[in-house]
């Protein structure tokens, strides 16, 4: 059987949820298809992480996020977005992967997906909103040994690294959060970053602590260095002083992700080769392909820091107006 709705949203992150709510309020029937769980990107955050944004700035649908602390935690956000989805009765097909977008008659789209058990679903719709978020493809280092089982691209918590030598690659918020949590859990941490210092966007309430740990030597830092090889118990680092062999039984490469644009490219949406930004009108979020829209961080291409929840949550309103 083929279901029919006015719009299909691909991705159930905060911006996909916000877009669905905007359409629902405008009388636009819609369904979200999500290959993982609701707001799955947030589930990938470290368990003890707090958001950079305030509670007000990550709220959606006009529903306040009330917390007792200055910044919402990962747990706060997960509970909040579950509540919002339930409050609005948002239709989300979780753990379902979109396989194909194809144009059909009368300028409509056919969206074919499958569940994790292999069941196929077909939906015909007038509009497709790509809200696939940030945690797509890891930005790999491209070095020998990167495929070893002790190399990780996501960090959840530090307990499993207790009393071990750990290398964290990167110098932005994800790397800093991981390095501090690993240190608190009793790991011997070395931070490797290709720039001469930590990134400028490191959270201001976190920067003093990471700088203090580096200054006192409890976290080692190698700046202007790059990983050139990973071995079972050593990371080879190249820098101004030549190659270093840094002990490591666990490696966390916190170097970001690449957007997944395969579905967009398959239907003819141009991708700017340098920036990775899919072609779209930032005022309407419409791509040059009629009926295909962007919502959230997918519109920022390779520079994921350009769009957050707080400036992507209104994309749904722009799409509805268009």
Image: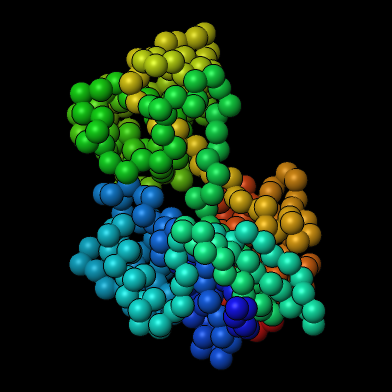
**Residue 110 placed where, x, y %?**
69, 72
From the viewer's perspective, tell me whether residue 137 is left or right of residue 77: right
The single residue placed furthest to the top in the displayed view is 242
Quadrant the N terminus occupies: bottom right
At a point 73% along the width and 44% down the height, the residue shown is 274
- Quadrant of the rendered structure where residue 253 is? top left
Q: Is any part of residue 216 visible from this angle?
A: no
- Quadrant of the rendered structure where residue 154 is? top left
Q: Is any part of residue 17 visible from this angle?
A: yes
Above or below: residue 35 compared with residue 246: below
Above or below: residue 228 compared with residue 260: above
Q: Nearer the viewer, residue 108 or 257?
A: 108
Q: Nearer the viewer, residue 75 or 57?
A: 75
**Residue 105 placed where, x, y %?**
80, 79
The single residue placed furthest to the bottom in the displayed view is 27
**Residue 54 placed where, x, y %?**
35, 64
From the viewer's perspective, tell me whether residue 176 is left or right of residue 31: left
At a point 55% along the width and 44% down the height, the residue shown is 137
At a point 32% along the width and 47% down the height, the residue shown is 46
**Residue 79 placed where, x, y %?**
29, 67
From the viewer's perspective, tell me whether residue 274 is left or right of residue 35: right
Q: Nearer the viewer, residue 120 or 163?
A: 120
Quadrant the C terminus occupies: bottom right
At a point 71% along the width and 74% down the height, the residue shown is 109
Colour treatment of the image: rainbow
């Amino acid at each position: 059987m083929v279901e029919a709705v006015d719009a299909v949203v691909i991705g159930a992150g905060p911006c996909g949820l916000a877009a669905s709510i905007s359409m629902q309020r405008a009388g636009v029937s819609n369904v979200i298809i999500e290959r993982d769980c609701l707001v799955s990107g947030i589930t990938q955050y470290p368990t003890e992480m707090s958001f950079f944004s305030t509670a007000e700035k990550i709220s959606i649908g006009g529903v306040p996020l009330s917390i007792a602390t200055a910044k919402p935690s990962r747990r706060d956000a997960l509970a909040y977005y579950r509540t919002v989805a339930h409050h609005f009765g948002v239709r989300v097909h979780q753990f379902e992967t979109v396989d194909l977008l194809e144009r059909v008659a009368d300028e409509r789209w056919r969206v074919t997906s499958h569940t994790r058990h292999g069941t196929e679903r077909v939906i015909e719709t007038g509009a497709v909103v790509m809200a696939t978020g940030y945690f797509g493809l890891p930005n790999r280092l491209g070095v020998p040994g990167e495929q070893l089982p002790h190399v990780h691209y996501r960090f959840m918590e530090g307990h499993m690294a207790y009393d071990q030598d750990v290398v964290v690659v990167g110098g932005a918020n994800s790397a800093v959060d991981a390095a501090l949590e690993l240190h608190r859990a009793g790991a011997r941490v070395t931070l490797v970053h290709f720039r001469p210092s930590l990134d400028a966007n490191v959270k201001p309430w976190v920067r003093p602590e990471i700088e203090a740990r580096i200054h006192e030597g409890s976290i080692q830092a190698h700046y202007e260095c790059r990983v050139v090889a990973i071995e079972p118990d050593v990371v080879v680092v190249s820098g101004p002083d030549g190659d270093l062999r840094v002990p490591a039984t666990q490696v966390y490469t916190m170097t970001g992700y690449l957007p997944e644009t395969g579905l967009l490219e398959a239907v003819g949406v141009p991708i700017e080769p340098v920036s990775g930004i899919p072609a779209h009108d930032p005022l309407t979020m419409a791509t040059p392909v009629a009926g295909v829209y962007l919502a959230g961080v997918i519109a920022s291409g390779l520079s994921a820091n350009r769009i957050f929840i707080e400036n992507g949550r209104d994309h749904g309103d722009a799409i509805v107006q268009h």
